[in-house]
Amino acid sequence: MVEENETVGTDTGKPIEVVGAAIVRDGKVLCARRGNGKSLAGYWEFPGGKVKPGESRREALRREIEEELLCEVTIADEVCTSIQRYDFGTVQLTTFICHLESGTPRLTEHQEIRWERPEDMPSLYWAPADVEAVQLISVMNLDRKQGSTMTDASESPLDNVTSELIEHVPGATSSVLEDVMSGLIKRRPDAPGIYAPRLIANHPGNTMGDVIGEELENADSFDMSVAFVSAEAVKSLFEDFKSSAERSGSAQRSRLITSTKNHFNTPAAFWDLLRLKHVTGVDVRIWNGGTDRSAHSGAQGQPFHPKGYVFARHLEDGSPTTICMSAVPT
């Protein structure tokens, strides 16, 4: 997508803008493996390339796919924008869901392309800049009509989905589900209004890190389940974890679980998690479903991809309450 000999952003310059296409066909996503002799050779990525001066991101993506795969695509929803610093500069990658419009993808730059189910994508070794998009797409339902991965506004999610969830989710109530769906998916004036869902858009001042820090200030205990952890994230929240443990004195009731899935977590991240455990007393656990003999036999080899955060605390009147968050809609 971007090579070392190209002029790219530096630590003091503007990041180079790059676009990538998650091309969908029959519910599967096209994954491309970088060729030998290129930077990050052998890693998987979404095809795409640089945005030229005067081009919009969608225009650039359409051009790049025509040049790179010799086919045409319809560009649908934007998945995310991630920033990754490499030895040769800083890349800002925006990934889009796309659908084949005409032609068949052919190899011109990559050594291999394959179609993968979204849930199987994290098993590949992805270029760092693509990891965030892979995480998000791996939990999407792509078996929908061409052009969008979002819920069709003409559908009635509250009428059809809510009753189904209430039936299958233990402890679910119509007030919780209707308020969440009304607040985040499709506004409904007759929703109960008991709960106030909040969308964390990862914009400055409203990132997951900001909100986790806020909740740690008031939580008596917490449970966090995250498939991927960065050393930078642990470091940025370390003092919040420490202050929470010192204030509540209940860190032994707080737990954090992550995994070794696909080696996305670096040794530095595990080292910082170990330090977090020793300093704060948080019960840190690592899911290794492929080899962990202590795991339930039915879970052996299963992928680990939850992103849930539960904070427990008491209100001023002494009554208990729980704050629940998820990094992506599931």
Image: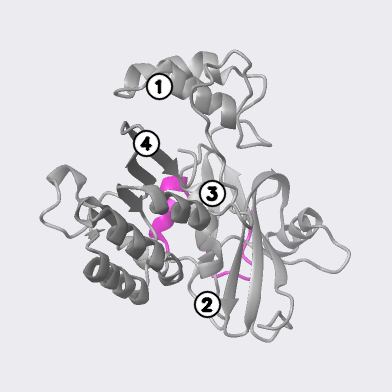
Report the Cα–Cα distance between label 2 and label 1: 43 Å
Q: Foreground mark, 2 or 1?
A: 1
* Mark 2: amino acid: Leu
Earlier sequence position, callout 1 versus callout 4: 1
Which of marks 1 and 3 precedes in the sequence?
3
Q: Mark 1 points at which residue?
A: 165
Give the image location of residue 53, x and y in percent.
86, 69
Q: Between 113 and 126, which is closer to the camera in this rendering?
A: 126
Q: Helix or strand or loop: what does disc 3 sit on? A: strand
| Percent coordinates x, y for residue 303 in the rendering | 31, 50
Say whether marks 3 and 1 touch (CB < 8 Å): no
Label annotation for residue 29: 3
Look at the numbered disc 4 and give the secondary structure of its residue.
loop
Marks 3/1: CA distance?
28 Å
**Would you call the spot at circle 2 few (<14 residues within 10 Å), some (14-19), or many (20 or more)?**
some
Q: Is residue 257 above or below residue 317?
A: below
Q: Give me the C-alpha separation between circle 2 and circle 4.
A: 51 Å
Residue 122 in magenta? Answer: yes
Q: Which amino acid does label 1 sit on?
A: Leu
Q: Which of marks 2 and 1 is nearer the N terminus?
A: 2
**Observer able to see residue 164:** yes
